[in-house]
Amino acid sequence: MGDRWGVEVDRSVCIGSAQCVHRAPEAFRLDTAMQSHPAEPETDANERILEAAESCPVEAIMITLLGSGEPVFPPED
């Protein structure tokens, strides 16, 4: 079985650019305030979700490995 990820969007940072929705429309939604949120906060590891996080201009998307909490994105310094 593959890795499972926890996906979060820091709504205090999100500017509603919708880059995540364009990159992974199955994984992210915009609410009425035009801020992103994950469709599922726990999901199978997925390259499109990682690309969506990397495309966020303000790095509002955090991905961690479920179980260990190890960061997937953004990477630790």
Image: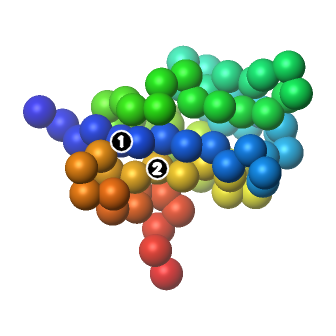
Q: Secondary structure at mark 1?
A: strand
Residue 17 x/y as whole percent:
83, 39
**Badge 2 is on which residue?**
63
Which kind of residue does numbered mark 1 sit on? Answer: Trp
Q: Compared with residue 39, is residue 60 higher up or lower down, i.e. above or below?
A: below
Binning the other alpha carbons within 10 Å of mark 2 as few (below 14), some (14 to 19) or many (20 upward) gives many
Label tally: 2
Q: Disc 2 residue type?
A: Ile
Q: Mark 2 and mark 1 in contact (Cβ < 8 Å)?
A: yes
50 to the left or right of 13: left
The circle drawn on residue 5 is: 1
| Between discs 1 and 2, the one toward the N terminus | 1
As drawn, 25 above or below 51:
above
Compared with 26, 57 (above or below) is below
From this viewpoint, which residue is outermost toward the left?
Answer: 1
Q: Which residue corresponds to the image point at 78% horizontal and 53% vertical from the top-left? A: 13
Q: Is residue 44 left or right of residue 77?
A: left
Point out residue 41 in the picture as x, y percentages from the top left corner: 47, 32
